Each structure stands twice: as C-alpha cells, then as structure tokens.
Amino acid sequence: MVFRATGENFPVALRLLPRAYRDHLLAVYGFARFVDDIGDEAKPGDRMWLLDLVDADLDRLYAGSAPCLSAVQELAPTVEACAIPAEPFQKLVRANRRDQTVIRYETFDDLLAYCELSANPVGHIVLHVFGQASPERLPPSDRVCTALQIVEHCQDVGEDHRRGRVYLPAKDLHDFGCAEEELAGATTSPALRQVVALQTQRAARLLEEGRPLVATLSGHARPAVAGYVAGGLATVAALERASYDVLGRAVRPRRGRWLASWLRLLAKGR
C-alpha cells in the first residue's frame, strides 16, 4: 500500500501517486534524512562545517548553479518543478544546528519553537510539491507536523537520551517527579509514563486541530496528506496501547490502524 522508510510512522510516498509525485517526495525525504544524519551521526567536531556545506549547496542551487552534494543534486529537479522556496530547506538545516547546542527544552512552548524548524517546514514543502501551499493551509499543516514530531520524540526517549538529548520538557519531568536518570532505564517508570502520556495527549489535540487540512486538499494531495495524519493517529493509538512504555519495547503503529484512519480521513474529506 505504501512505501515506508525504516522506523518512520507514516508513508513517505503512496504507491497510488503518479511517479513524478513519488520521486519528488522521496527526494525531499532524502534531503531531510541526509541533514538529520549529519546532525546525529557525523563526528561531533565535523557536524557544523558539514551543515555549512549543505547551506552553501542550497545557496548554489537557488542561485542557479549546480550543487555538489548528491542529496541536493537529487533535490534540484523537485525544487525547479514545484517552485519550492529555499526557506523550508534552510530551516531544516537550522534545526540540526540547534541540535548541536540545545540538548534540553525547559517548557512545551520551547519544544514547539524547535518544531517550527525541525518539523513544520516539511509540511510546507509537501504542500508545494502538490501545488497547494496556500497561506490558510500552512497553520493546520504545522499542527500535523508538530504532532508527528512529538510522537516521534515519545517513541525515541531512550535513543535520544543515549545521544545526550532530551526532548521531553524539563518542566513536565519536574511536575511528575521524573528524574532525568529514569530516561536511561531498562523499563519505563510510572512517572515517565505520565510525562509521555501528557506529550501524547498534546500531540493528539494537535492532530485533531490539523485534521481539517485534508478536506481542503484536492487531487493527489488529499490521499498523501491523509496518510501523514493517519500515521500520527495510529502512533498515538500505539502509545496508548503500550501504556506509554517506551523503554521496555519498540512502540510502532499497526498497519491496520493506519489504514483504517486513512480511509476515514478520505471519507470525511469528500
């Protein structure tokens, strides 16, 4: 039914889309993955200058010159065909720069500000790919993308902590009496489950606020964006089903739950 990238909660490109759209979405995903890998996997001392190379290559692309990096080269036809502005791509690079210096977030509002760089630009790019990036569609798109980022943080609590990062707001950890050391545990403590439950509930509300976006879309954009929303809903359900135990198991959405949510969204979208 869908192409999926390893570990992702939502379809990268639906098989039912025309080849051109699939290629554009996969090029965008490839760029975002490439930048994330620099921010997460490159040697710490090399990350900033590698991100400088990405910024410089984006500048070359938008100046009409040939880019040097393969991920940017593969992005070039998509940028030209879909008239995607540079800012969303630049924000994704800025998000990874922030990851090198900001490794804790005090409040949920602070985390939302991070999502403005790390998640929301992807939604803008996707809407541009389908030629439907109107001003009124961007706010609900932002809610969906932020929700997807939050549930991913919930799933990856242990992995993020091993990398030295905590995306659960410090205020929430404090309010529920959850010490940061508990994020390194082999099992999920009751206090940590409460913190994860709160973030999941917040993500669910954001998905509800962003869900009407699907009904505003036409053509191939509707099933594609419905797939992303359905992925978020299915992941919320998976976290709830696991009782927010994110350390003792890998919490992943069920395909059947994703499909059911996707079909409901499409039916309401008509």
Image (cartoon, helix red, strand yellow):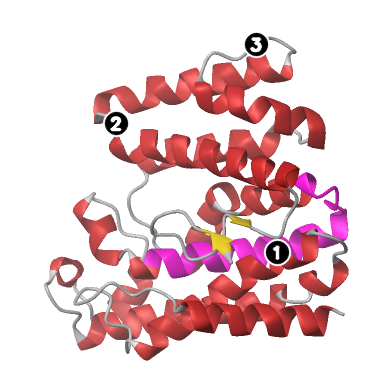
Quarter of the image for residue 250 reads: bottom left
The alpha-carbon separation of the residues under discs 3 and 1 comes to 31 Å
Which labelled disc corresponds to residue 42?
Answer: 2
Residue drawn at x 68%, y 41% is 24
Q: Is residue 229 left or right of residue 100?
A: right
- Per the image, the residue denoted by label 1 is 225
Q: Secondary structure at mark 2?
A: loop
Q: Which residues, given as a range, are shown in magenta?
A: 128-153
Q: Nearer the viewer, residue 269 or 172?
A: 269
**Residue 237 at x, y = what percent?**
47, 85
Residue drawn at x 52%, y 84% is 257
Query: Mark 2 or mark 3, which is nearer to you?
Result: 3
What predominant SS class does the magenta segment belong to? helix
- Answer yes or no: is residue 193 visible: yes
Reading the chain from its start, which is encountered first: label 3 or label 1? 3
The alpha-carbon separation of the residues under discs 2 and 3 comes to 25 Å
